[in-house]
Amino acid sequence: MTLRRGDSLLLALGIPVLLLVFFSLVDVLPTGTRHPVDFLAPGILSLAVMSTAMVSLGIATGFERSYGVLKRLGTTPLGRPALLAAKTTAVLAVEVLQAAVLVPVAVGLGWRPGGHAGLAVAAAVLGTVAFSGIGMLMAGTLRAEATLAGANGLYLVLLLLGGMVVPLAKLPGGLRAISRALPAAALSGAMSAGLGPGRVPAHDWIVLAAWAVAAPAAAALTFRWE
């Protein structure tokens, strides 16, 4: 159902594939690598996680709440944590499809992943839980229109500050410090190290785990069915 909506399909696959192909072929970003795709592929996979888990989920849930769909669910034994868990699981299914598209495209552009795929999968799961919590937090507390604007605005900010298309090392010192406390930078850092030769920094795992606990907890506590 998620991928049947044009806006969700654009966020889930259109934008990630376009960014991956364009910036891999047009070397205009300060990636610091001989082949830009080596930096971009893990970052774009992280971007795909953020797009689906936060933006698509948050907006869709916000309008479900606005249309009264969630009000009916609220009369059933389904509780807030169960609703959050069910929607996060659905997001993970979409992400498998995203990876099935993005990885072959990146390999076709010359990417040769290394490292430990298990670490990258663990990072993706933690990132999904964290961003789903943020999306549900907005959807459960804001009006649908505000969720739409807020999710898209936050998406752009995290895209620029998350180390997904621009390395964190290229950001000014103040912005870099802020970025390292955000889930986007932690996810892209863990994903890049997991799929590359470097070690995953403990700081990224700690930040990602903290967001994966705090954001869903806040969403579960504050979510309103109507």
Image (tube, rainbow, N blue to C red):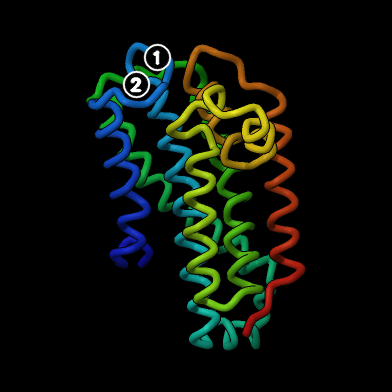
Q: Which residue is mark 2?
A: 36
Q: Position of residue 134 (x, y in %)?
A: 62, 57
State the residue at coordinates (40%, 14%).
33
Quadrant occupied by the N terminus: bottom left
Callout 2 amino acid? Pro
Q: Are marks 1 and 2 in contact (CB under 8 Å)?
A: yes
Question: Which residue type carries mark 1?
Answer: Thr
x and y percentages locating residue 174 in the rendered image: 67, 32
* 213 relative to 73 in the view: left or right: right
| Viewer-nearest residue: 169 or 101 | 169
- Rendered residue at 45%/42% (across/down): 47
The number of numbered badges drawn on the structure is 2
Crowd rating for badge 2 (residues with CA inside 10 Å; few <14, some 14–19, many 20+) = many
**Measured from the top left, where is residue 35 in percent x and y?**
32, 16
Which quarter of the image is occupied by the C terminus? Answer: bottom right
Q: Position of residue 12 (x, y in %)?
A: 37, 52
In the rendered view, would you say 123 is above or below 135? above
Query: Depth check: 57 or 15 in front?
Result: 15
Asked where in the image residue 30 lies, by quadrant, the reply is: top left
Instruction: Tell me the distance, in whole angstroms, between the alpha carbons under discs 1 and 2.
Output: 6 Å
Residue under pointer 1: 33
Q: Secondary structure at mark 1?
A: loop
**Residue at the image position 54 percent from the left and 54 percent from the top:** 154
Q: Is residue 78 above or below residue 152?
A: below
Quick check: 161 left or right of 4?
right
Q: Residue at x 31, y 56 (%)?
A: 10
